[in-house]
Amino acid sequence: MKILVSSHHFAPSVGGIEESSRLLAEAWTASGHEVRVVTQTSDPVRGAYPYPVIRNPAAASLLREVSWCDMYFQNNISLQTLWPSIILRKPTVIAHQTWLPGGVGGILKRTACRLVSRTVAISNSVRHETDADMVIPNPYRNDLFHEEDQDEEPHEKRDLIFVGRLVSDKGCDLLLEALLLLGERGVRPSLTIVGTGSEESFLRQYVSRHGLENEVVFAGKKAGSELAGLLRNHHVLAVPSRWKEPFGIVALEGSACGCAVIGSSGGGLPETIGPCGVLFENGDPKMLADQVESLLTNKSTREFRDPTLRRRHLEKHTPNRIASEYLVLFEEILAARCR
């Protein structure tokens, strides 16, 4: 099968859409399909991939690529690259990675979705708000994020870790506020903050102003095996987002590395966490503090949840499993067109 993946954001940019697009393209290529990727993300260093990546295609180039494929897969809807599919009536699947906007833009996207073969949502929460036909969740790198690594020297584990962009939506400041509340109770967990962003300066000042320097470490931006090693060295991953996360791949990565997960209850994050953690109300630092204290009272995260349930939950999100679910859908669509 010739599969064209449209991913508005793609490597070297970093994010959930970029990661899922790359993992699916790799899995489909490895299973013998011919894959190409079109993206609006530039790559000055011209990284190598096991499939062609067409960056910032002109209209004629995009039309040519869509003409080439048997199946056009848009990983999150982009009207900028969807039009050739509608003109050519090409079999097309759109995966909704987030909520559709309001206003004219949202109306246009909802209308376009009715003109394609099938729409997919990455969580039931996203499906509810986009009227997608079905749910296929996102994958995570199970080859990289796992508990055992023979090359790593054992370290004494730290308590909490936050991984994400340091912006208001991600709620790192709520986690620091929760630490202050815990300090008033005589509980002083350690916290590692992984990531960079526009609020980093504010967060550092907050830590200094409230005397949290002994508890909080800013680790900067980490990825790949270095991030996996950090996750394995912590008991609890906190995902304290203010906004409703559509999915939250980092929760899978943390769970796979042995962390219990505390996440906000809005959006699709509860589905991603599954049996591997606990929830708190979005924007509620007191409830967050209560959940942190409850988890850290018993630091043995392996006893926190049933390891069999955790394994089964993570197996639903391996790249091969998710890629296969999409292939079943693609083949169903193509078979129906041949009748």
Image: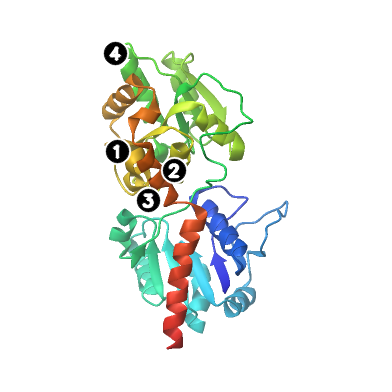
Q: Are marks 4 and 3 in contact (CB under 8 Å)?
A: no
Q: Amino acid at mark 2?
A: Leu
Real-space Cα separation, disc 4 to disc 2, in angstroms? 31 Å
Q: How far from the left and from the top, in percent, is residue 222?
A: 58, 35
Q: Amino acid at mark 3?
A: Pro
- The numbered mark at residue 246 is 3
**Mark whose residue sits in front, 1 or 4:** 4
- Residue 221 in view, yes or no: no
Q: Which sits earlier in the primary sequence, circle 1 or circle 4?
A: 4
Along the line of sight, the residue nearer the viewer: 106 or 30: 30
Q: Residue at x 54, y 59 (%)?
A: 24
Q: Which sits earlier in the primary sequence, circle 4 or circle 3?
A: 4
Indicate left or right for 114 with 152 as reference: left
Q: Which sits earlier in the primary sequence, circle 3 or circle 2?
A: 3
Real-space Cα separation, disc 2 to disc 1, in angstroms? 19 Å
Real-space Cα separation, disc 3 to disc 2, in angstroms? 14 Å
Q: Residue at x 60, y 69 (%)?
A: 33
Label 4 sits on residue:
185
Real-space Cα separation, disc 4 to disc 3, in angstroms? 34 Å
Query: SS of the residue at dot 3?
Result: loop
**Mark whose residue sits in front, 4 or 2:** 2
Label 1 sits on residue:
282
Q: How far from the left and from the top, in percent, is residue 312?
A: 39, 47
Tag 1: Cα neighbours inside 10 Å, few (<14), some, or many (≥20)? many
Along the line of sight, the residue nearer the viewer: 91 or 205: 91
- The numbered mark at residue 252 is 2
